[in-house]
Amino acid sequence: MKNIVIITPVYNDWESFMKLINEINRVISGFKDISFSLIAVNDGSKEKAPSFSVPHHFKTIEILNMRINQGHAICIANGIKYALKNYQFDNLILMDADGEDRPEEISDLIKKARELQNVSVVAKRVKRSEGPIFTFFYSLHKLLTLIFTGKLMNFGHYSLITKNDSETIIKEPTIIYCFASTLKNKITNLGNINCVRGKRYFGPSKMSLFRLIIHSFSIIAVFKMNVFIRSALFLVLLSYLKPYIGMISPILQMIIVMFNIFIYIISTKSSEKILKNMDFELEGTEKLTH
């Protein structure tokens, strides 16, 4: 029997978490040859987790309590590291707890992984549920990422990854600020499924616009060497174009320089020391079984 561990960060939104585990329980009931466990990484929530029993089709549910709020990236990295130390598993499934990563697509991830065999599978977003303004800026973010890194980033956290790939990416310091880019950067062979961005179960997003912008730049910062090389080429090109485009050239050059400074600052968050000391961010664990 195969073992899959689902990892999901939670910040105060325990109502969504409760709905999520019941939705997942319904979906995984059809996989009789797989044992499922779940790790919820409590990201320093001020609201206490409610008491609950483990749904029938889960083997265990464990809550890892972070000392302070650190954000999704640190939570996911901690969850992966903890799973590698404490669980026997074949695959990890990483997903958000708020409903935007739809539980029904777990079936698609598993089926695709069986088809490809020993290949990690990401959920590629082909349709979003947000409004036109968010969609516009998301498209702009994807375009900037492609221009400055040469990488098309069309997936987020939602994925099924093999144990081997888990062991590879957890060694990369960039995972503490962006899981998806680290996976894309270090694992060349990735399968994918099409997915639809779901609607939140309850209430508005708890992530501010500022943190969304930082997250966007964090995705790009993983590929910082690509960014620096391409930016240097763009600066040279703009110098040659100055006789034709006038003052637009130095303005664009200044924007590119500022962009690179920001990317560099974000990339300094990555360090071997922080990666090795992640365990100290955990305050305690609560494990529930049948």
Image (cartoon, rainbow, N blue to C red):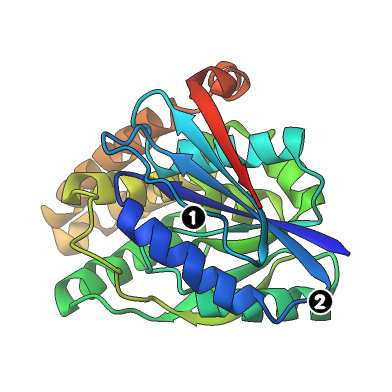
Image coordinates for residue 268, horizontal then vertical, percent = 44, 25
The residue under the point 36% across, 76% down is 198
Going by the picture, which residue comes out furthest to the left? 247
Above or below, 48 against 141 in this view is above
Residue at image coords 42%, 44%: 72
The residue that appears at 69% across and 33% down in the rendered structure is 171
Q: Image check: 221 left or right of 202?
A: right
Between 85 and 246, which is closer to the camera in this rendering? 85
Residue 17 position by quadrant: bottom left
Instruction: Determine which of the numbered discs, if any, sits on residue 149 in the image.
Output: 1
Q: Position of residue 58 (x, y in %)?
A: 65, 60
Q: Secondary structure at mark 2?
A: helix
Which circle's residue, 1 or 2, is located before the other in the chain? 2
- Asked whether the residues under the numbered discs 1 and 2 touch, taking CB atoms below 8 Å apart as contact, a structural biologist would say no
Examine the rendering and report whether any part of residue 169 can be seen.
yes
Specify the label residue 114 is tagged with: 2
